[in-house]
Image (spheres, rainbow, N blue to C red):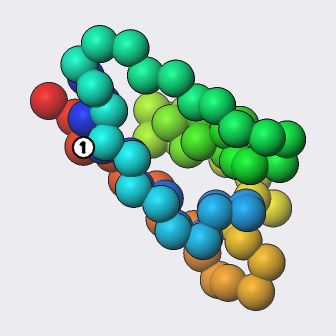
């Protein structure tokens, strides 16, 4: 189970760390807030393909890490 997601320099997200609950987790927010980017970050740590275009403008790399148990 994914316990925590940490993202740095991924699209519009400069830095974020999200702890997940054992039960239900819901992403809400306005258009452009980064909900789909969070899902993309989860996809990346699960081995999904990621485009280099997703790296935040003006930075060299994006870092996505997950803590699982």
At numbered mark 1, what does the secondary structure look like: helix, strand or loop?
A: strand
Which residue: 45% across, 32% down? 46
- How far across and how far down the image is residue 13, in percent? 64, 63
- How far across and how far down the image is residue 47, in percent? 49, 35
Which residue: 28% across, 26% down? 21
**Looking at the figure, which quarter contains the N terminus?**
top left
Nearest the eye: 46 or 5:
5
Q: In this view, does 33 lie above or below 43?
A: below
- How far across and how far down the image is residue 51, in percent? 75, 52
Q: How many numbered discs, if any?
A: 1
- Residue 9 as seen in the image, left or right of residue 30: left
**Looking at the figure, which quarter contains the C terminus?**
top left
- Residue 51 as seen in the image, left or right of residue 44: right
- Residue 62 as seen in the image, left or right of residue 2: right
Which residue is labeled 1 in the image? 67
The image quadrant of residue 41 is top right
Q: Is residue 14 above or below residue 48?
A: below
The image quadrant of residue 22 is top left
The image quadrant of residue 59 is bottom right
Q: In this view, does 29 lie above or below 58?
A: above
- How far across and how far down the image is residue 63, in percent? 48, 65
Res. 11 in view: yes
Q: Is residue 59 above or below residue 17?
A: below
Which residue: 81% across, 62% down? 53
Q: How crowded is mark 1: few (under 14 residues within 10 Å), some or many (20 or more)?
A: few
Which residue: 65% across, 83% down? 60
Res. 48 in view: no
């Amino acid at each position: 189970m994914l316990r925590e997601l940490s993202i740095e320099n991924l699209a519009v997200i400069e830095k974020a760390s999200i702890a997940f609950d054992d039960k239900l987790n819901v992403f809400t927010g306005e258009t452009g807030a980064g909900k789909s980017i969070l899902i993309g970050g989860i996809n990346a740590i699960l081995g999904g393909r990621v485009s280099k275009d997703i790296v935040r403008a003006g930075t060299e790399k994006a870092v996505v890490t997950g803590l699982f148990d």
